[in-house]
Amino acid sequence: MERRVLIAGVGLIGGSIALAIKKEHQARIVGFDLNEENCKLAEKMQIIDEIASSLEQEAVLSDLIILACPVEEVGHMIGRLSELPLKQNAIVTDVGSTKGKIMEKAEILNQKGVTFIGGHPMAGSHKTGAGSARVHLFENAFYVLTPSAQTDESKIVELKGWLKGTKANFVVMDPKEHDQITGVVSHLPHMIASSLVRQVESHAQTNDRVRWLAAGGFRDITRIASSSPEMWRDIILQNKSSLLELLSEWIDEMNFVKSLVETGNGDHIYHYFSGAKKFRDSLPVRAKGAIDAFYDLFVDVLDKPGVISRVTTILAEEQISLTNIRIIEAREDVFGVLRLSFQTDEDRQRAKTCLEKTGFETYLNM
């Protein structure tokens, strides 16, 4: 019989996983989404083969169920699935950024003989929706799996087989360890970025020059603060215990920095920045981590009519997709700088090659 895969949540992540499965397996991909327009678009783009008439009706027929919806919704979905006579050999997984509470909720499925394995593909895009789904979205990214202690090893291998088309690097991890690690390298940085923005906002209310000067480097280092407020509300609520510990540690760190400033010891201040630089420079450059990377290319351009259009036309002809374009500096009769942002390092390298062939000077760092 033809194997069936149910994707509950046909957006960027769910759609990209669907494409990866279609690439490697002969299976019927069925989509379900609370927003039916997402499913219609995914079907039109041949990301899914059909639209489920209901979650319940399709779930009982499915061999693999992927809950690609927001973390708060995953718990509700698990509750609905637990009331159904799912196939005993079926696997249920999710793509949530937190795992502890989800794994606790999923015990109800494991007790009924249905295997639930938590999942978190650590890759995304600045774009959203099924229309942005890409088969290569997770290539070389870490894909964390968090099975329960009772999960049969063969089911983990089976799920990896289903997902092999993602070309991701699978890591099996304890749910608590996952939440602690993603808390420190992803969730806490998002909170800090948002806090920095709120602090600048408060100063901008009394001095409008703050807003204009923040348009440069400050805007760049706080880009992650522009992420979905709804998504981050749910993530913070799901990973509350880990984040409370991390916030306490961060407060201690800031108190230490405050003491460095108060004492004014130049050597101590230097070593603080030097230690941070040394560790930051040791981090992998090309590896995909918990926070989406920004692949930027800088291009020197003269302030002439049509120059930006020429750059984008060259990229369009090579079918290279931009995620963002920004003029960093542009003054009459001198070189300005365009910052082009791409979804992958491969796209950035292709853009660099084709622009340099047409006479533009490019570089990877400002």
Image (cartoon, rainbow, N blue to C red):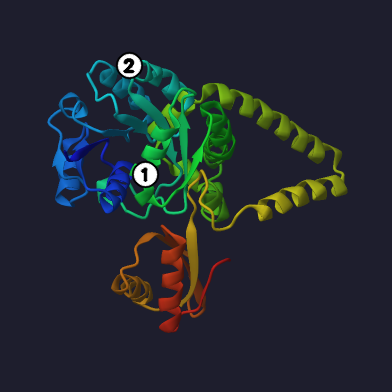
149 sits left or right of 323 in the view: right
Q: Residues within 10 Å of mark 2 (few under 14, many from 20)?
A: few
> Which residue position holds label 1?
161
Q: Residue at x 57, y 40 (%)?
A: 185
Secondary structure category for the residue under label 2: loop
Q: Residue at x 35, y 77 (%)?
A: 305
Q: Above or below — where is 232 with respect to 364? A: above
Q: Residue at x 28, y 32 (%)?
A: 65
Q: Above or below — where is 228 with respect to 25? A: above
Query: 108 or 90: which is nearer to us?
Result: 90
* Residue 286 image-quadrant placement: bottom right
| Residue 300 seen in the figure | yes
> Which residue position holds label 2?
112
From the top left corner, tell me how far across and down residue 359 is, in percent.
Answer: 44, 84
85 sits left or right of 361 in the view: left
Q: Residue at x 47, y 62 (%)?
A: 345
User: Amino acid under label 2?
Assistant: Lys
Q: Residues within 10 Å of mark 1 (few under 14, many from 20)?
A: few
For marks 1 and 2 on the same chain, the one whose residue lies earlier in the sequence: 2
Give the label on residue 170, or none. none
User: Amino acid under label 1?
Assistant: Gly
Query: 56 or 250: which is nearer to us?
Result: 56
Secondary structure category for the residue under label 1: helix
Query: 8 or 187: which is nearer to us?
Result: 8
| Residue 329 seen in the figure | no
Q: Above or below — where is 152 with respect to 85? A: below
